[in-house]
Amino acid sequence: MYDVTAVCRAYVDLIVPVSFEELKELGLIPGQDQLVSKEEISRLTTKFLDRAEIWPGGPGANTVSGVRALSGKGAFIGKISDDQMGKIFKKDMDERDIDFDTEVLPNDVTASCVIFVAPSGDRTILYNPAIADKVTMADLETNKAVLETSKILFLGWLNRETKCADVIKRIYELTPNAKYVASLQSYGARENDEFDAISKADILLGNENEYGLYIMDLKLDDIAELSLAMPEKTFVCTKGKHGASVYQKGICIDIAAASCDKVIDATGGGDAWAAGFLYGMAKDMPIEKCGALGALCAAEIIQHNGARPQGSWTHLLEQVK
């Protein structure tokens, strides 16, 4: 049995320190986010590879990495190419002993994000999803046994793409006994989003801003009312340093944030929280312990650079017994 399987975009992040002069030469404004062409992201990753910190990413892959660090069994389904970024992503998954058996698409571009960090700390982000959404029916058949034996299925950005509808439908057919998890990440960022997975989700993850937009669209007052309207679901709202709240059938369970010595990089804090929470759910822990474990994982990840664990997290399990 797999504790958590994620079907999500495979991304690789390059973090590049730059001067304001370099940003100006590149025609970039500090703090902006910009979708660039697949060709441009490939050019940028090649150009800055030697001076960048490289972190394989993507929320689903990050979350499964956290589950694995807790000793859980995890799998990932996502599309990469055989370029340098794809090789980096695959190597990381292999080293973490995460099942990742999706056919590599040759001679193409792996989804990448180049993050230019100015002296002020402002981040200028250029990205392109490239081939990340090209998971195929054949990939699902390859992973049929994985999907059929997964306790929890985390569906990432693919579930928001209309062009992936047939693939998502087949995933549901192969996972009739799994708990479905969806995320409100970047909810409302685009007009053509497909949110069918939200309606199917047993567990919905999001932060306060994302839930605010979602609740407003549903013409409800708050998450408590939302959970009364959909009593079969669990709603998880993360609040950064203020912890998190879990709602079920109108009842709110507040989860305190775990203490940490120093915040180095908040990237991936939400993914780590999800890892701890979903691991707990897969192991049938009480909600309070699932949340406490999520908080411990989040505190662990933000004390170093990168959105994935840099060692085992099994010691955290002792703290929630």
Image (cartoon, grey):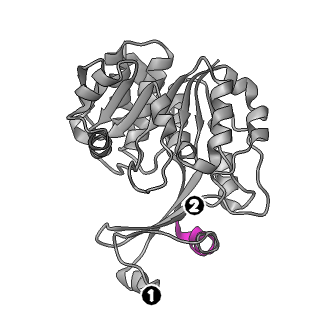
Q: Secondary structure at mark 1?
A: helix
Residue 304 within the magenta-colored segment of the rendering: no
Percent x, y of residue 299 = 33, 37
Quadrant containing the C terminus in the rendered view: top left
Residue displayed at 43% across by 84% down? 27
Nearer to us in this view, 176 or 152: 176
Residue displayed at 44% across by 56% down? 191
Q: In the displayed structure, would residue 104 be above or below residue 126?
A: above
Q: Could you tell me if residue 98 is visible in this image?
A: no
Residue displayed at 45% across by 35% down? 198
* Residue corresponding to mark 1: 25
- Mark 1 to mark 2 CA distance (whole Å): 21 Å
Percent x, y of residue 250 = 25, 20
Percent x, y of residue 270 = 38, 40
Residue displayed at 34% across by 30% down? 236
* Quarter of image, res 19: bottom left
Q: Secondary structure at mark 2?
A: strand
Q: In the displayed structure, would residue 228 be above or below residue 77?
A: above
Magenta span: chief secondary structure: helix
Specify which label sits upstream in the sequence, 1 or 2.
1
Q: In the displayed structure, would residue 190 be above or below residue 199?
A: below
Amino acid on which disc 2 is placed? Ser
* Quarter of image, res 49: bottom right
Nearer to us in this view, 248 or 124: 248
Residue range in magenta is 43-52
* Residue corresponding to mark 2: 112
Nearer to us in this view, 176 or 154: 176
Amino acid on which disc 1 is placed? Glu
